[in-house]
Amino acid sequence: MRIDLVLAPNAGPYTGPGTNTYVIVDDGEALVLDPGPVIESHEAEIVQAIGDATPVGVIVTHTHPDHAPLANPLARRLGVPAYGYGAGGDFVPDIPIADTDTIAVGSRRLVAVHTPGHTPDHLCFLLDERLFTGDHIMGGSTVVIEDAADYLDSLYKVRDLGARTIEPGHGPHIVDAVATIDEYIAHRKMRERQVLDAVEAGAGTVEEVVAIVYSEVPPDLRPAATHQVRIQVRKLVDDGELLAADGRLYRPGSGP
């Protein structure tokens, strides 16, 4: 088996060095995972990485614009199906896939693992003891999420898969999968504690919590920080750890 990383030229504040596209080759067949945005030079590098292998599919972990837009055009060019959890943005799967579904390449199979949290449609893929994580886990960075409860549940789910290494959607290869996943879980719990501490210290709005918890975040990342706090607050309200009344946040027992 051979796995080639083809880095998309779309570096930025939210994509790091760029999107990691993976070309997985086994027994003369090739799968493309997360082809990324529609960039002609990137598509040419993917095709070059496939080489003499017979392509059998194009897969996306989720439908964000830095992962999925090239999938349908590339699949048509290669004459293969595009796989994904569902339609979104510029992507429509030819073959929808869900949790525990498998996709064959040569003598091996990728197992789909539904991991909502970053997005509702997010999938990771387990190949032997290697986990392809898209934006669920990234090399050298934490992740912007849409649902804090789902995301934490999905972290526990992938921790139990028995993967040894991680191939993330952005950033470098991760050697110790379990240790990294544990770090992600600890980070999410730390953020919960920081939000609760900020409210106990007198912060009553999301913006006031952001000013305390993300005081060192640069201005260009402040919208993402505000989004993260809103998502975290929603979970803490659902969990009964926070109350929201009259436009303010309170700890139980200390409301108006």
Image (cartoon, rainbow, N blue to C red):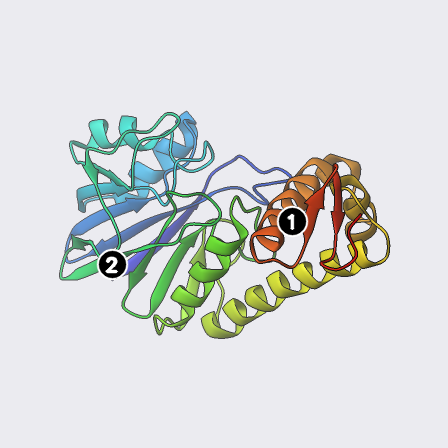
Tell me the element at label 1.
Answer: helix
Task: Determine whether 131 is above or below 40 in the image.
Answer: below
Residue at (37%, 71%) from the top-left corner?
163
Question: Which of the two discs, 1 and 2, labels the residue nearer the N terminus?
Answer: 2
Task: Determine whether 221 is above or below 127 in the image.
Answer: above
- Foreground: 30 or 94? 94
Q: 21 left or right of 112?
A: right
Amino acid type of the residue that numbered disc 1 sits on in the rendered structure: Val
- Foreground: 244 or 164? 244
Residue, disc 1: 233
- What whole-number distance in Å separates the C-alpha atoms at marks 1 and 2? 33 Å
Q: Which numbered circle lies on residue 111?
A: 2
Q: Quadrant of residue 245?
A: top right
Residue at (74%, 37%) from the top-left corner?
247
Q: 60 left or right of 237?
A: left
- Residue 116: x and y in percent read 41, 50
- Foreground: 152 or 103? 152
- Residue 41: x and y in percent read 42, 29
Task: Determine whether 236 is above or below 50 in the image.
Answer: below
Q: How many marks?
A: 2
- Residue 244: x and y in percent read 69, 45
Amino acid type of the residue that numbered disc 2 sits on in the rendered structure: Val
